[in-house]
Amino acid sequence: MRRILLLLACASSMPAHVGSPDVFLEGSAGPYPLFITIRPPVVIPGVAEVEVRVRAKDVQRVSIVPMPMAGAGAKFAPAPDVATRSKNDPQFFTGSLWMMTSGSWQVKVTIDGSEGEGKLAVPVPALANRTRKMQFGLGALLFGLMILLSAGAVSISGAASREAQLEPGQTPGPEHLGRARISMAVTALVVAAILYLGNNWWNVEAGNYAGIIYKPLDMKPVLADGGKLELRLSDPGWLPRKVDDFVPDHNHLMHLFVLRLPEMERVWHLHPEMTASGILTHDLPPMPAGRYALFADVVHENGLPETLVAEIDLPEVAGKPIAGDDSAGAGKPDTASAALADGSRLIWEREFEVYPVKKAHSFRFRVETAEGKPAQDMELYMGMPGHAVFVRRDRAVFAHVHPTGSVPMAALKIAQPDPHAGHNRGTGSLSPVFGFPYGFPQPGDYRMIVQFKRGGAVHTALFDVKVQ
Ligand SMILES: [Cu+2]
């Protein structure tokens, strides 16, 4: 019975990133540059909050509509909602949308303005990740009402068999009182049976619900001979999902971040390859003995991104030299400007001493040469001007973010009817200034890992930031 009172099965949502459910996207809908923040619902079914900042004038209307990424629902859009324009800020629009089921969703954003219509689809994973406790006050109120109803039913049935057949003014005799007692006993039994069955029904529903609570794929890391890291993936049970249907993101099926514990002062960004169904392997680079945290980003065929998490103790690994898109970085974390191996610096154009929680920012960085001049020889690193990881020191939050935002490019491409929509393609030489749209989901001490490529070499810088 207590479970009836204390539990109300509902779910909060969490996307692929660990503990960082909000979706940030910097992109464009046709001719209109946008900054979009989507906060998936705390409960599913539930309401997602959508914020759209249009970086263009003359926008008449912003409309938004949620749809599944795949399946029949992806073809038939419901009527879109019109987002509300802010009174103080005519370029800022907000809206809320219902998300009815768990899974891989997208929010289609349509802008109508003087330059015609522009569309952008933003992938939003809506994943139930826990059963929430009922609030104590609500539980107490419902418990009181249940007692009142049960007692009421018993008392009404007693009164009915005692007095219903009496003339007005007549007092009930012993036979009426006896009948009333029997009737009340029977009703009490029936009420008890209803409560018992109701409790069972509730438990069955709660059990079913527990089955759809999101669990990322399990990842078991094993060090094989010759310094080969083997990652064995398995499904702990959730909605139908495969361990081998990943699509390449920046040309790689998996982006694996390896952080040395406990200080996270050394980091590797590696790209294991699938060598058998559900098994990804990689030749480790030279690494000192120690304990390491692994965060592996993958994107499923239906656009659902996941971050798989594991830890491993490693002996000293002689390893193979870093090659291809892999990179390694180490350093003392800074709070504003990081010295890089070649004497140049990465300057963080920091806005706050302590960052506010839940607020979207563009985290801007600038690369300066040893002489303090803007760097000229910037290159794309895996298709991006920069890669950033935001990880809380206790590792309960992990997000891998690009200048386009927190949505993996692979998922963004699946959502777009036009494969080139959604990202601003740079023309000419690459700017030494880049930014990452992100908002911290929870307070705490965070490590920020920023990677970019310059003159053929990948650089890694570490920063520390406090969030309240
Ligand atoms: Cu990246």
Image: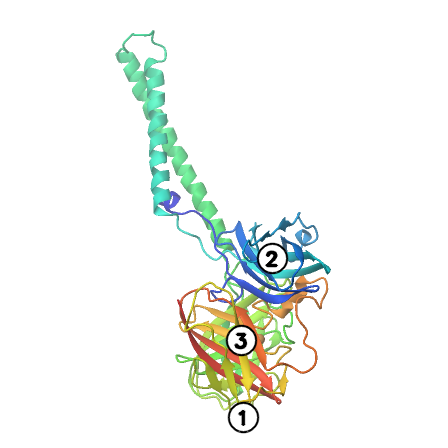
Image quadrant for the C terminus? Answer: bottom left
Q: Which residue is mark 1?
A: 371
Which residue is more in the foreground, 388 or 309? 388
- Between the C-alphas of marks 3 and 1, the distance is 20 Å
N-term mark: 3 or 1: 3
Q: CA distance from mark 2 to mark 1?
A: 48 Å
Q: Quadrant of residue 283?
A: bottom right
Circle 2 sits in a helix, a strand or a loop, which is it?
A: strand
- Find disc 3 in the rendering and name its residue: 364
252 is higher (above) or lower (below) than 55? below
Q: Is residue 209 above or below residue 360?
A: above
Of residue 210 and residue 249, the one placed in the foreground of this image is: 249
Residue 208 point in image, percent of width and height: 49, 49
In the image, is 404 to the left or to the right of 394?
right
Q: Which residue is mark 2?
A: 105
Q: Identify the amino acid type marked 2.
A: Trp
> In x, y percent, where is residue 212?
51, 54
Q: Nearer the viewer, mark 3 or mark 2?
A: 3
Which mark is first along the chain, 2 or 3? Answer: 2
Secondary structure under badge 3?
Answer: strand
Colour style of the rendered protein structure: rainbow
| Residue 271 in view here | no
Residue at point 53%, 55% (across, down): 49
Instruction: Give coordinates of residue 23: x percent, y percent.
Output: 55, 63
Residue 129 at x, y percent in the picture: 48, 58
How busy is the neighbourhood of tag 3: few (under 14 within 10 Å), some, or many (20 plus)?
Answer: some
Residue type (three-letter) at the residue carrying disc 1: Glu
Mark 3 to mark 2 CA distance (whole Å): 29 Å
Q: Secondary structure at mark 1?
A: loop
- Which quarter of the rendered picture does the N terminus lie within? top left
